[in-house]
Amino acid sequence: GNLRWKKEYGPEWTESHFGVRSTPLVIKDKLYFISSFGTIFCLNTTNGKVIWTVDTFKDEGGRNISWGVTENLLYDGDVLYCAPGGRSASIIAINRNTGKLIWKCKGNAEKSAYCSPVMINLPKRKVLVTMMETSIHGIDAATGKMLWSFRHSIDPFVSPNVPVYLDGYLYCTSGYGLGGVMLKVAPDGSSMTEVWKNAYLDPKIGGVVVLNGRIYGGGDR
C-alpha cells in the first residue's frame, strides 16, 4: 500500500470534475493516458519517467469539448487509437512505442463526443468504430480510410457509450432522448445498413450489456 512514485505531468481540468477523465492503459512496462487537454502520455510503470508525449491539439489540430477529453485510449498490437477531433485529423493512429503518427483520418471533420472507440475484427479487415459529434464512424484500422458514417446526433453533442459489436451487428446508443440504433455491418466492413432504432434505451453514461441475445442498460429520460 505504500506509494511507489508520483509524477506531475502538466495542466489538467479544473472545472466540474477535476483532473484527468480517462482510464490509464497499462501494457507491460508502459502506462498510457490522455489528458483532458488532448495530450497523450507514455510513462514507465517502474518509475513514472516520461517516455514520450503527443499533443494532439497542437500537432494534429484537435479541438477540445465542453467537459474535456474523456475517451479511453484503444490499442491493438503496437498501435494506439484516439479521436482528437481535428478538422483534418478527426481520428488518429500512433505507434505506442514511439508516439509517431501512423495515419490520420479526416472523417467528417467532427469533434469528439466523449466516446471510447472499439475494434471490430472481421475476416478481411479490422474496423475502428467510434461516435463523433454528429455521426458514427467506421474506419479501416490499418490505413485510416473512412469506410462509412451514420448520422447519430443529439444536442448537447454527448455520446460517451462504447459501441457494442456482436455477430455482424453494431449497436450504438446515446442519452438525452436520442436512444440507440442497430446497424448491420457488411462482412468486409466496407458498408453498413440500418436495422432498427429505439429511443427508449438512452443511457447518458455507462453503456449497455449484451447477454443471451438481449441488450440491458439504464435510460436517461
Image (spheres, rainbow, N blue to C red):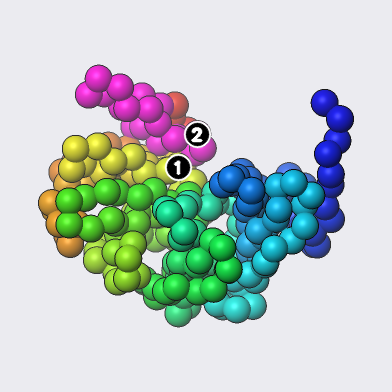
Mark 2 surroundings within 10 Å by alpha-carbon count, few (fewer than 14), some (14 through 19), many (20 or more): few
Q: In the figure, is residue 208 to the left or right of 43?
A: left
Q: In the figure, is residue 92 to the left or right of 47?
A: left
Q: Do the residues labelled 2 and 1 touch (CB within 8 Å)?
A: yes
Residue type of the residue flagged with mark 1: Asn
Which residues make up the magenta segment?
200-217
- Residue positioned 32% across, 71% down in the render: 143
Q: Is mark 2 on a helix, strand or loop?
A: loop
The residue at which mark 1 appears reads as 161
- Residue 164: x and y, percent? 33, 40
Most foreground residue, 15 or 207: 207
Residue 91, quarter of picture: bottom left
- Residue positioned 40% across, 36% down in the render: 202
The residue at which mark 2 appears reads as 206
Q: Can residue 192 be seen in this view?
A: no
Q: Is residue 166 visible?
A: yes
Most foreground residue, 12 or 127: 127
Q: In which quarter of the image is the N terminus?
A: top right
How many discs appear? 2
Most foreground residue, 154 or 13: 13
Q: Distance between the residues labelled 2 and 1?
A: 6 Å
The verdict on residue 216 being magenta is yes
Q: Is mark 1 on a helix, strand or loop?
A: loop
